[in-house]
Each structure stands twice: as structure tokens, then as C-alpha cells.
Amino acid sequence: MQSCYAIAAPHSLHERTGEGGIRTLGSLLDYGALAKRCFQPLSHLTKNWPEYREELLIANLSIISWRRQSCLRIFQKGVTVEQAGLPASHGLKQLAMISEEEALGRILEKVAPLRERTLPLLRALGCFSARDVAARLSLPNFDNSAMDGYAVVASDCRCGAHMHVVGEQPAGPDRHLCISHGEAVRIFTGAPIPSGADAVVMQEDVARDGNEIVINVDVAPGEFVRRRGCDLAEGQIILAKGEPIHAAAIALLASQGFADVTVGGEVSTAIISTGDELVKPGEKLEAGQIYESNSALLDALLQRCGAIVKSVEHSGDERGPLVEAIQRGIENDILIINGGVSVGEHDLVKAALRDLGGQIDIWRVAIKPGKPFLFGNIGGCLVFGLPGNPVSAFVTFLQFVRSAILKLMGAANLDLPKVPAKLTVDLTNDGGRAHYIRGKLEHGKFTPVGRQESHALFGLSQSNALLRLAAGESLTADRIVDVQVWD
Ligand code: AMP
Ligand code: MG
């Protein structure tokens, strides 16, 4: 820890500063004047005033903070606002805990879709269309048979009617056959309908003898004929800008003769896990150590979004190596740093980002689990600091990182899919943060599973959906709620 000190300013001083605290703070934090009255080492304050612990530790980063109109002012010894390197716009309010909505809004403001690219169809799976694509052809593109059978004039065909077979039309080049009353053409599925014919009778309903057939059913006009354009009209939009390209969309594009498609950019990402206690799976575990599992979680989630994971690194809780790992990670569009974003002395991510001239826009969001979530950037790389507890990492990834990735990729819909479900139990959120409950969505019902704590990975692994319980909200069993489906 650096030599940090904090000052608890008398309440009257707070009132004089008002909301524009940071500007006035320069004079308020006249170190000499205040230090004489209430000057204590940081560690002392954190011990005695646990409710201010987080704010106090921000001082470690040379940031001055306040909370809930509190009378607390903190600063690093001798550091002015200007020396702290804060731009004028970088007020204290920006580092206060904010709501999820505000956090997501601020993140997405910073995200601009990447440059589009044109890919062969099959490489576009999981991408998002960068353009509105219009149909070049009607579907079907010509009237054709839905069955193997005989093309006929429907009005001739009463049960027991006789027809003369005048030709054969397989699927393939149009033989331009033509029939009139009393005639039929042997036809196969997908083959063009001969002119003059207006129906197809299935071969199962026909008895054939040489070139004569007897029809065993009544036939209605249009029967077993697939009309030109009945599925899709030429010029109709078949893929809108921002829509996902899934298997059926690829098939549709192929059916229109497109060999490639223009899609949003490819998002490159890096993951850094932090923590001295972490050991790579496969290696020997000593007492006090745990296996590093979050980079596997994040890697899988990133792949699921369609992002490319370029590197996965681990750094111990040491500032130098962490800074070096971050320097490598910021070669990408997105860097996720996992762990080390909380308020303990070993949480070095904020300090490391500042060492590299990074901008921190968000730190702490009113979300449970996941409160210490951090967002900022270093140059063009968006940096997400996710808390180390696995469920916190999972929830903050899905609520914030996923949306940013999708926007970079050019997606129109940035939200997780939501479905209505009947809640099977009563739920109450007494806390002041929105709580994401992990649960199982099955047969239209949502049931919380496992321990609802941020470290409880097993419960998470048994879930497939999240229910957001707003701060102070109570829900009774049998209520219909919207749940986010993540699997
Ligand atoms: P931190 O956010 O670094 O304070 O970590 C919070 C908790 O998450 C601690 O119990 C860590 O051991 C655990 N943790 C941090 N990173 C990981 C990781 N990569 N894999 C599994 N657990 C982790
Ligand atoms: Mg840690």
C-alpha cells in the first residue's frame, strides 16, 4: 500500500461543497488545515469505520471520493485533484456506485460497432448482418410439384377419370411440356408444372397401365402445386441489419444464390485472471490454493457470444506483472481482468490501470452479485474488471460484457433472451442492490437452485436462467415473471 492518509471532514464542510465537490475539494483538502483536526492513517480508518472501507481504499488510487452525501473526504497525502490526473469532467460522482441501467448505458455509449467485413456464407455463422438483405428471387421461383405423381387439369379429375400420359417432367431443366383436357404429365417433387396443368395428383392415388392412368380421387385446383412466390416475394427483406446469422439464415441466403454475406466485425478479446491463490487445472493443489476456473468460464462465455479469445493469462497479486499482462491484453478490442477489483489491499487492478494511463469510468454497480464491477479503457481497448467470485463474474459478464461485445459485432438486440415463467417460491430482496437469482427454468416454471451466494459455482452450474429481483422487491409464488435465459 502507498502511504495514504484520509481525512474525515466535519459535516459543515461537506455542506459547503455541495454536489460539485471535486472543484471545491482542492481548497477543502487543504491538507495542513484539516489534517490537524482529524488526520489518521488509512488503515486505522478502514478498521474503525467499516462502512467507509470502500471509499477509503479508493484513496489508494489518489482518488477522492464521497458517498451518499456523506461528510467524508479522502485523499492521498499532498495530492491535489489536478495532480491526481483527473480530467475536469472526471467528477467524484462518476466513481460512485451506480445502477445497472446507468452502467450499461455508459458502457454502450463507449462502444462503436467494428468495421464490417464480407465472409463466405459458412464462415458467417454466429455473426450479425451488417446490411438489410433483400430477396433476389421469389421462393419458390417457379410453380413446382410438391409430390411425385401426375400433373393434371383439376376439372377433368373426378374419381375414376381416365387420362393419357403425354410426357415426363423430372426435377431439373424445364422441358416446357404442355397439357390439355384428358392429358397428364408424369411429374416429380420439385419439377416445374407443365403449362395447362393446375394440380398434381399423387402417384399413390393413380393406377397406371402403359400411357393410360385412372385417377382414384377427386382433385381440387392447386392441389400439390407449390406456387411461385408463396413463401417469399422478390425484393422482400430476408435478413435485417443487426440480425443474427444462424443455420436457417445461411440456408436462406444460399437459396438466393448468395455465396457470401457482409457482417459486423470480429471482436478480439483477452482474459487475465488474477490471484496468488489460483492454480491451473491439472497442477498440484497446495493448502490454501484453489483451481483457477473463471478464465474457463469467461472463455466459454466469450465464445458463445462469437468473440475471439486471443489470449488467456494469469497474474499473481503483484502490480508489476499485472501491469505487464494488461499491456499485452490491451492489444485487443476487449480486455477482461478477473479478480482484484474489490477493495482489499491485494486488489490491484485499479492501480495497474492507472499506471498505464487507463481511464476508469465505472467502479461498483448496484448489482448482486458483482458489485465491484469495473469498466474503463486504455486507448481503444475496452477494459472490464469482473469480480473474482465465479457467480459475480458470470452475472456481470452477461449483464455488461455480453452487450458490449454484441454491439461491437453489430447486433441489433443486445439483451439476453427473456421468457415468462411461473415462480415456484416466494422471494424477497431486502438489500439495496438488484439481485440476480440463479434458477432452473423448466416447463414454464422458475425455481431458484443452489446457494444464492457469489462463490456458489455448483448452484450456478445447475441453473439455466436468471431472475432479476429489484432492490426491495418481493415476489410471491405463482407470480408470472420474466426470466433471462442464458443457456
Ligand atoms: P477477488 O475478486 O480477487 O477478491 O476474488 C474473490 C474470490 O473469488 C476469492 O475467493 C478468489 O479466490 C475467487 N477467485 C478469484 N479469481 C478466481 C478465478 N480465476 N477462479 C476461481 N476463483 C477465483
Ligand atoms: Mg484476488
Image (spheres, helix red, strand yellow):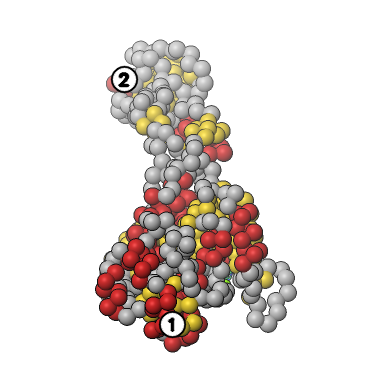
Q: Mark 1 points at which residue?
A: 39
- Label 1 secondary element: strand
Residue 283 visible in the shown view: yes
* Ligand 1 contact, mark 2 (Cβ < 8 Å): no
At 42% from the left edge and 69% from the top edge, which residue is drawn?
64
The residue wearing badge 2 is 156
* Left or right: where 103 falls relative to 254: left
The residue located at (42%, 33%) in the rendering is: 131
For the residue pair 250 and 171, the one nearer the viewer reads as 250
Quick one: which residue is furthest to the bottom in this view?
48
Question: Which residue is painted at 37% across and 25% down in the image?
Answer: 234
Q: Quadrant of ligand 2?
A: bottom right
Q: Is residue 70 above or below residue 87?
A: below
Say which residue appears at 42% left-offset and 49% top-offset: 110
Give the amino acid type for the residue marked by disc 1 in the picture: Phe
From what the image shows, is residue 307 above or below residue 162?
A: below
Q: How far apart are marks 2 and 1 (CA)?
A: 105 Å
Q: Would you say residue 342 is visible in this rendering? A: no
Q: Position of residue 396 (x, y in %)?
A: 45, 63
Image quadrant assignment for residue 423: bottom left
Q: How many marks?
A: 2
Asked if the residue at label 1 sits under 8 Å from ligand 1, the reply is no
The amino acid marked with disc number 2 is Asp
